Image (spheres, helix red, strand yellow):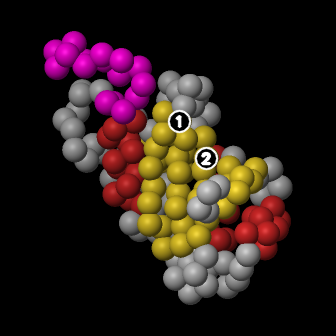
Amino acid sequence: MTNEDLKQTITNLCSSAEFKDGPQFLEVLIPAESLHEVCLELKNNGDTKFDYLFCLSGVDQPSCFEVVYHLDSTVHRHVVVLKTRTADRENPSIDTVGDIWPTAYSHEREVYDLLGVTFNNHPDMRRLFLEDGWGFPLRKDYADPIRIVER
């Protein structure tokens, strides 16, 4: 499936999707409220068959947090990068995709641990590396006077 075919398929699923031809992969910005439905269809659709989530990461943007999903079809050999944004910085949350790709559960815990983004319906939303009360060290506004970390 070409990037143009992927664009058309994703547009049919979510008319508000925004596309960017990245240097390596097609990048798609999906509204958070549509993310789970789009991901489920991209995995289950025989033409796309994105059966492998190989990376999930979080990015601190000035007005929100962005969660980035790298998807691969081991059947059709095409790749897409989906991005979504949280509604706000104070209580950032989006729906989990762990029920679609179970490997997402660990990645989501890492994003929660380092950025504070919670994933709705995640069965084990707790810190992965740091102790409770530590703060979220990958946030641009993170400061820790005890460990002398300032931004």
In the displayed structure, would residue 83 be above or below residue 37? Answer: above
Q: Amino acid at mark 2?
A: Thr
Residue 65, disc: 1
Residue at image mark 2: 84
Locate residue 135: give its quadrant: top left
Question: Which residues fall within the magenta stretch?
Answer: 136-151
In depth, the one of 57 and 44 nearer the eye is 57
Residue shown at 79%/69% (left/top)? Answer: 4
Residue shown at 21%/38% (left/top)? Answer: 130
Please say whether residue 127 is visible from this viewpoint.
Answer: yes
| Main secondary structure of the magenta stretch | loop
Q: Quadrant of the N terminus?
A: bottom right
Please tell me how crowded label 2 is: few (under 14), some (14-19), or many (20+) other residues with Cα within 10 Å.
many
Mark 2 residue element: strand
In the displayed structure image, the side of residue 143 where residue 132 appears, left or right: left
Q: Amino acid at mark 1?
A: Phe
- Residue 137 highlighted magenta (yes or no): yes
Residue shown at 58%/81% (left/top)? Answer: 77
Locate residue 111: give its quadrant: top left
In depth, the one of 4 and 67 nearer the eye is 4
Mark 1 residue element: strand
